[in-house]
Amino acid sequence: MGSASKQSNKPSGKQAGLDRRARIAELRAAEQRRDRRNKIIASVVAGTLVIAAIATGTWIVVDANQDKKAKEAAAAAPIDGVQTFGELSRNHVKEKVTYPQTPPVGGDHNAVWLDCMGHVYDQPVENERAVHSLEHGAVWVTYNGKATPDDVKALSDKVKATPYSLMSPYPDEKGTITLSAWSTQLVVDSANDPRVGEFFTKYVQGKQTQEPGASCSMGAM
């Protein structure tokens, strides 16, 4: 009996080449799918970030506008107890001036103003120079011996943080604490009175200012 010939299961060289190319094509297709998927994810993330940035920016703008409107409303609102004194003279003089208000709120004054960029004086100051600071839009905080150390500390902190304001003791004033702006005045009993903050908001460089934008830092005693 003759032996049967054995058939080989090995793929031919041509078939192996086809299989290899098919495998490479499959791998490339999978890689392209991954690339497309990653690009889609990146686009979604980037879009989300852009939307978030726009939303945040819009929120900041809206918040700033609301804050501005709130300040404008506060500046326009009347403050209980505030006195105003109408038109006052504004001449520069060298002599002492007798003022009808104590402390004064305006009138003729010295040609040199006091430093009023948040300056706290520990001694009484010259009326005539403080009045010139009021002309530039400053708020002048004064107090007598009835003010407590806590009052003085709170008011000092407020003034130091507020350009166009100044503070000094004023032993002869009737009220415990007096806030003065040009032709405008408010007397309070405590630094905790909410009208103190309202007065600063309304009158620091407020509409009563006679010389808007004038310097408050080049004056002297």
Image (cartoon, helix red, strand yellow):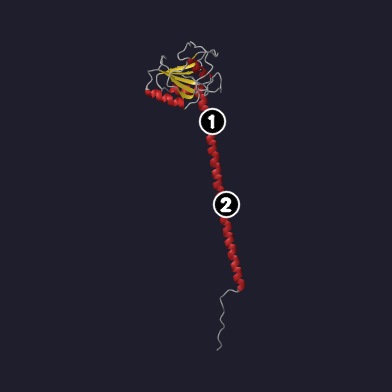
- Secondary structure beneath dot 1 equals helix
**Which residue type does callout 2 highlight?**
Lys
Quadrant of the image containing the N terminus = bottom right
Instruction: State the residue in front, 190 or 26.
Output: 190
Q: Is residue 45 visible?
A: yes
- Residue drawn at 61 percent across, 70 percent down: 17
Instruction: State the residue in front, 167 or 178.
Output: 167
Q: Quadrant of residue 80?
A: top left
Up the image or down, 23 lies above or below 201; here it is below
Report x, y in % for residue 169: 42, 19
- Residue drawn at 54 percent across, 34 percent down: 61
Up the image or down, 181 lies above or below 65; here it is above
**Which residue type does callout 1 highlight?**
Asn
Residue that mark 1 sits on:
65
Report x, y in % for residue 210: 55, 18
Q: Is residue 142 left or right of residue 34?
A: left
- Secondary structure beneath dot 2 equals helix
Instruction: State the residue in front, 52 or 132.
Output: 132
Instruction: State the residue in front, 199 or 62.
Output: 199
Distance from Cα at disc 2 to Cα at disc 1: 38 Å
- Residue drawn at 55 percent across, 47 percent down: 44
Q: Quadrant of residue 48?
A: top right
Q: Quadrant of residue 177?
A: top left
Label 2 packing within 10 angstroms: few (<14), some (14-19), many (20+): few
Say which label, 2 or 1, has the lower sequence index: 2
Report x, y in % for residue 25: 60, 63
Report x, y in % for residue 144: 40, 17
Residue that mark 2 sits on:
39
- Residue drawn at 48 percent across, 21 percent down: 139
